[in-house]
Image: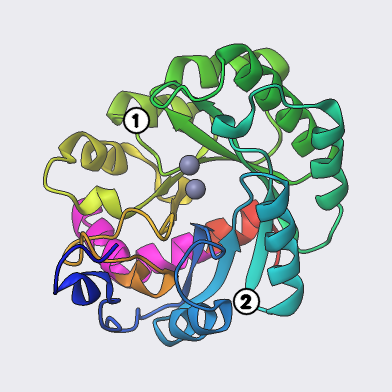
Amino acid sequence: MSRNGDGQSARSFPPLPERLPVDVFDSHCHLDIVDTPVQEQVRSARAAGVTRIVTIGCDLPSSRFAVDAAGDFDDVYAAVAIHPNETTGVLDAVLADVERLAAHPKVRAIGETGLDYYRDWAPKEDQHRSFRAHVEIAKRTGKALVIHDRDAHDDVLAVLDEVGPPENVVFHCFSGDARMAEICAERGYVMSFAGNVTFKNAEPLREALRAAPLDLVLVETDAPFLTPLPHRGKPNASYLIPHTVRAMAEIKGVPLAELCTAIAANGERVFGPW
Ligand SMILES: [Zn+2]
Ligand SMILES: [Zn+2]
């Protein structure tokens, strides 16, 4: 990545933020692609008051990685799935492997699955078939469903209405507006906010957060992506969650400790007791 002399400093991780008053967790992280050993990510997260991390699968190798990391580290839990961008010609045998991996007790969610009309790397037909199959896996295994919804709100909601959602549905990196937040709230869907809620141009997302009931709000990094202000442009990792949570408390106008307590309780309800 280093294109000039200061490439090294541009890639360096930001300092440890002040610890949150109540421990929270990271509902969506890609431990496998953050450029730091998992052990270090877990250690720095804990130092910041981020005591649980759900690491996400996007294909079979990353889903296996997630299960292994969850086996190796007490603070790590896994989600397994085929990402919508990876669903071109997806085979039933692959989906059966996802379901087999999901049997592990530290796999707490099926994700990330859903629909991505922004990138459109996979044909819509394949995305839909895979998404529906993942919804069924979530229902059969009793695990939460972690949804990737990019420019596809209406179709994601329609598929869930049609096939019937599992008990716990999480819209990861929530990207809807206030109206979408109200629709999700009516259905009891959980909205997980990422660092982009701090970005200057994200006012519609902040309106959505204001509209989201406290008992349906989660926080995530989606690390290594979406580093919150004031470190936008630097690499992201779970220990940077406090920046996002502090911004969220201000946006919602609730005391920081109250928001942290709600996030922690919502996490245990959605992903099961840690
Ligand atoms: Zn995603
Ligand atoms: Zn992700």
Q: CA distance from mark 1 to mark 2?
A: 30 Å
Q: Locate residue 236 relative to residue 36 in the image: left or right.
A: left
Total numbered labels placed on residues in the image: 2
First to last magenta residue range: 243-264
Residue 120 percent coordinates (x, y): 46, 22
Question: Is the residue marked by circle 1 packed among few (<14), some (14-19), or many (20+) residues within 10 Å?
Answer: many
Of the image marks 1 and 2, the number of the one nearer the N terminus: 2
| 265 sits to left or right of 259 | right
x and y percentages locating residue 251 in the rendered image: 20, 52
Which one is nearer the viewer's eye here, 182 or 173? 173
Question: Where residue 266 sits in the image (x, y, percent)?
Answer: 54, 56
**Amino acid type of disc 1?**
Gly
Please give the label number shown on residue 176.
1
Quarter of the rendering occupied by the C terminus: bottom right
Report the amino acid beneath label 2: Asp
Q: Quick one: quadrant of the N terminus? A: bottom left
Q: Secondary structure at mark 1?
A: loop
**Rendered image quadrant of residue 176:** top left
Residue density around tag 2, few if under 14, some if 14–19, many if 20 or more, within 10 Å: some
Q: Residue at x 16, y 39 (%)?
A: 203
Q: Is residue 111 above or below residue 241?
A: above
Residue position for label 2? 75
